[in-house]
Image (cartoon, coloured by chain):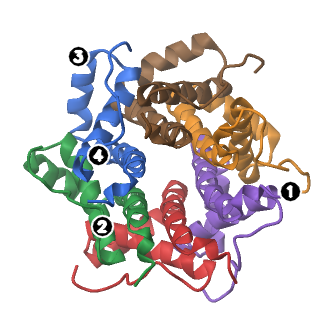
Chain colours: A green, B red, C purple, D orange, E blue, F brown
Amino acid sequence: MTDIWLKSLLTRTPQEGFELAITLSRRGVKYTQPDAAVLQELRSEYANSAEGLTAASQVVAINFQTVAAANDYWRKP
Amino acid sequence: MTDIWLKSLLTRTPQEGFELAITLSRRGVKYTQPDAAVLQELRSEYANSAEGLTAASQVVAINFQTVAAANDYWRKP
Amino acid sequence: MTDIWLKSLLTRTPQEGFELAITLSRRGVKYTQPDAAVLQELRSEYANSAEGLTAASQVVAINFQTVAAANDYWRKP
Amino acid sequence: MTDIWLKSLLTRTPQEGFELAITLSRRGVKYTQPDAAVLQELRSEYANSAEGLTAASQVVAINFQTVAAANDYWRKP
Amino acid sequence: MTDIWLKSLLTRTPQEGFELAITLSRRGVKYTQPDAAVLQELRSEYANSAEGLTAASQVVAINFQTVAAANDYWRKP
Amino acid sequence: MTDIWLKSLLTRTPQEGFELAITLSRRGVKYTQPDAAVLQELRSEYANSAEGLTAASQVVAINFQTVAAANDYWRKP
């Protein structure tokens, strides 16, 4: 990919970190399937499947581990 | 999302940390499927499936790793 | 939940730590499905499925990582 | 369980650590399904399934992370 | 394999690190199935499956944890 | 097992570390199913399945985390 979408893992708040984890999870998908129309269709599929949503939440959890460690868990206010 | 739901990863006790891990797991789902009615329906589905419950417990375990590390495992009383 | 079930991640021995990891895994399930009768039925289902047992063992392994780190791997006797 | 099966995570060599990881994985199963006859039958099932074997290998990999960290990766000879 | 494809885990930016994580994930597949024609066919299969894409994204997330840790999370600009 | 197959987690290069991660993944399978003929047959099965290959790549990724940490990510040239 030629566009720059990830400049830093540092975020101001844990919530922004969680949202970055979601971005990372979606990008992981997009590198494999870059076609936006296909993604849109598949998205509506797993967004209505209990199993698909749990699997998506697991990828977010793994990426959130990375982002949280990068930010030293936002321990300092 | 515009509401603030995650201000800190720090909790007073391990149990509160575990409950935060559950919140994180559910939020991971909610970002993908924001429709509360759909979520409610799917929830009753996987809450009655052995496989679904184990998968949900796994996401909680991964998020609990993050929360526990953030709190230095609540080692100091 | 109002009952206190998790006061500390520290255990005296690795085996007690492993057993705490099992408790954490089951609690992860119980927060999603609090009904004991449903849990009992589902339990007998996955306890007789190779796939279900391996998945359960994986959740235990993830929680054991957390408990073991909390106890600094019980390195000091 | 009343028998003592896990006294330490420390092993002399990485290979012994890997074998301890296998023990941990099997114990994770045994706590859920203590009946040896049922386990034997299920074992022959997943030992002949590509998916089952990969899943078992994944649990071993997760437990090996724990054992390897406990032993500081056997860096010192 | 005789070709050299992985000289370092260090990258200049987080995004390059993410792309290295994708390379690692694909290599993990290629060691098991080296036949490029088979890979191409299977790729079009899972690239059009919600479940397959989520699973692929999960492997990327795990490898990204490794690459990010290696780079100390690109904390220093 | 009586043969010695794992003497150290240290490797000279990241690529050798990745290949060690593959060895660990295969050994995890072999401890469960030691019969080489059965393994060969199952291998050709999952090597031709998108899902099976992704699952195999995930186990490699987990083992690579361990090997990379053991080698301090090969940071020093």
B54 to the left or right of F35: left
Q: Residue at x 36, y 60 (%)?
A: A60
Contact? badges 2 and 1 (CB < 8 Å): no
Badges 2 and 4, same chain: no
Q: Chain of mark 2?
A: A
Q: Chain of mark 4?
A: E
Compared with E29, D76 (above or below) is below
Contact? badges 1 and 4 (CB < 8 Å): no
Residue E59 circle label: none
User: Is residue D49 something that shows in the picture?
Assistant: no
Callout 3: helix, strand or loop? helix
Badge 4 is on which residue?
E17
C66 to the left or right of A39: right
User: Is residue B77 something that shows in the picture?
Assistant: yes
Residue at mark 2 to residue at mark 4: CA–CA distance: 15 Å
Bin the neighbour count of mark 4 within 10 Å (Cα to Cα): few under 14, some 14-19, many 20 and up. many
Question: Which of the two discs, 2 and 1, sits closer to the camera?
Answer: 2
Q: Residue furthest bottom?
A: C2
Residue at mark 1 to residue at mark 3: CA–CA distance: 52 Å
Residue at mark 1 to residue at mark 4: CA–CA distance: 45 Å
Tell me which amino acid carries mark 4: Gly
Q: Residue furthest top?
A: F37
Residue D1 circle label: 1
Badge 2 is on which residue?
A10
Callout 1: helix, strand or loop? loop
Where residue D77 appears, x then y in whole percent?
72, 32
Q: Give the camera-side residue of B45 and F26.
A: F26
The quarter of the image holding the C terminus of chain B is bottom right
Question: Which of the two discs, 3 and 2, sits closer to the camera?
Answer: 2
Badge 3 is on which residue?
E37
